[in-house]
Amino acid sequence: MLKNYEDLSPNAIDILKEIGNIGSGNAASALSEMLGKSITMRVPDVRVLDYQAVIDELGGPEKVTTGILVLTHGDLEGMIMFLLDDSFAKVVLSTFLGKDNVNVLEIKQDMTDFSAVVEMGNIMAGSYLKALGLLTNMVIDMDVPSMTVDMMGAIMNYPMIEFSEVGDKVLLINDGFEIDNVSIKSNIIMIPTVDSLNLLMEKLGVTNG
């Protein structure tokens, strides 16, 4: 029985890496269909890191990032956050709205731009969680995603405060994809409750050894 994320064995991490690979691939396929563009995925890397290490890993506290937050319920209680670099919003707005020279920090000031990026995030999150549910036979519900564009330090404040009872460690799935030869860095932070993490391991038949 896991007591915290640090108890995850190398075997469990390998399984989570494969789950991340399949979930990310499913999300990328949904995005490819909506954009009408081919997408190439990178093989994800899964690690257990503390919050400060995540912030440093992803460019430091002042790095401007698009964060899409999804609260999950049902068999998997917790949070999933998609962290996407500027290229994601630029590709979405260029494809759907024909916009060039997008200033990511100004997206929230234009409801049309904001809605387009949120909808893409919604589709990616839904596809990711659907794949996870099918793989694990878990019932996973999600709230409507919320999106923000802010510095990494500010974005990470929310999970640090709201999920402090889980501990100071998170699962970082470091992946990314390429759209029309444009490389987009993508990271997923998973913070399931410890009970949900144990259920996930049980459903996958993973022994923590």
Image (cartoon, rainbow, N blue to C red):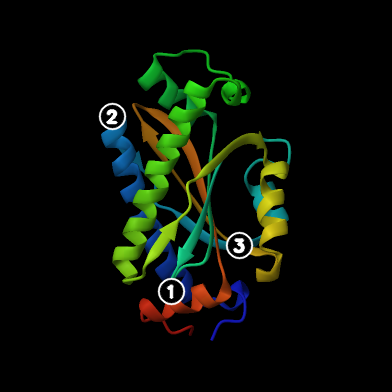
Q: Is residue 64 left or right of residue 174?
A: right
Residue position marked by numbered label 2 in the rendering: 37
Task: Say if 183 sits above or below 16 in the image.
Answer: above
User: Which mark is first along the chain, 3 or 2?
Assistant: 2
The image's mark for residue 200 is 1
The image's mark for residue 120 is none
Mark 2 secondary-structure assignment: loop
Q: Nearer the viewer, mark 1 or mark 2?
A: 1
Q: Amino acid at mark 2?
A: Lys
User: Which mark is first along the chain, 3 or 1?
Assistant: 3
Give the x, y percent position of residue 142: 45, 55
Give the x, y percent position of residue 126: 38, 50
| Quadrant in which residue 195 is drawn | bottom right
Mark 3 secondary-structure assignment: strand
Give the x, y percent position of residue 28: 34, 43
Residue drawn where x is 34% and y is 64% of the image: 133
Residue position marked by numbered label 3 in the rendering: 170
Any part of residue 24 in sight: no
Task: Say if 117 sits above or below 14 in the image.
Answer: above
Any part of residue 133 in sight: yes
Task: Say if 9 sits above or below 104 in the image.
Answer: below
Q: Is residue 59 left or right of residue 45?
A: right
